[in-house]
Amino acid sequence: MSSFLFNQGLQAQNKMLTTKKKIVKPAGKVATDFENTVAQALVDLENNNQDLKDLKDLNIVSVKEVEVAEGKKAVVIFVPFRQLKAYNKIQQKLIWEVEKKLGGKHVMIVAQRRIIRKPSSSNKVKMQKRPISRTIRAVHDNILEDLVFPNNIVGRRLRYRLDGSKLHKVYLDRKEMTLTEHKLDSFSAVYHKLTGKEVVFEFTVQSTSADN
């Protein structure tokens, strides 16, 4: 019995070490229980699913749960920016598998990006020129593209309400409609949580005109 318990404890310790390697945290930051759960799910997939073996070279930065509606939650997995393209190659299969492990919660993968504030007049000289990719607008636009992948954004419209608030409409290509139509509410909830902006997602209207 003691040998069995020792082996069980050793296996649990090995799992914990493997999970820690999967999560890249700044010094002093500790992963949450939920982040460890997601990391373990990824480790299990890379070990047991041949289609996802490339996961062994990939990491995650953090994981957030976002309330969608009626008790539903979406999960956002933040990954290192330099690894995003590698994730994109296996993303659809990966998301299907992770969603199954998380009880059907909608899962999205977003690259970790850093916004650099516009320099004030007092420190313009001290600060280097801010890259366009680090502006709030650029980062928010990139988050939008990450969330809806593999959909393509084909149009946008900004609507001003009578109370002065803004509503962004984002139009997606119908080609990937069957893959993500059920996630539109989750896209809106997650984008609002991450950026504070209200967005409604719609698919382009299918043309009914026939060639003459």
Image: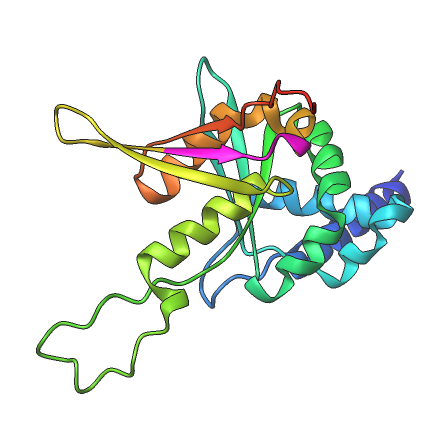
Corner quadrant of residue 117: bottom left
Q: Residue at x 73, y 40 (%)?
A: 92
Q: Quadrant of the C terminus?
A: top right
- 113 relative to 202, above or below: below
Percent across and percent down for residue 86 are: 71, 59
Q: How many marks?
A: 0
Residue 5 is covered by the magenta coloring: no
The single residue placed furthest to the front in the displayed view is: 212
Q: Residue at x 47, y 44 (%)?
A: 144
Q: Nearer the viewer, residue 190 or 12?
A: 190
Q: Nearer the viewer, residue 158 or 52?
A: 158
Residue 33: tell me if it is visible: no
The single residue placed furthest to the bottom in the displayed view is: 125
Percent across and percent down for residue 138 are: 39, 58
Residue 89 in the figure: left or right of residue 147: right
Corner quadrant of residue 170: top left
Q: Residue at x 64, y 27 (%)?
A: 177
Q: Quadrant of the N terminus?
A: top right
The single residue placed furthest to the top in the displayed view is: 70
In the rendered structure, which segment of residues is drawn in magenta? 169-175
Q: Nearer the viewer, residue 109 or 135?
A: 135
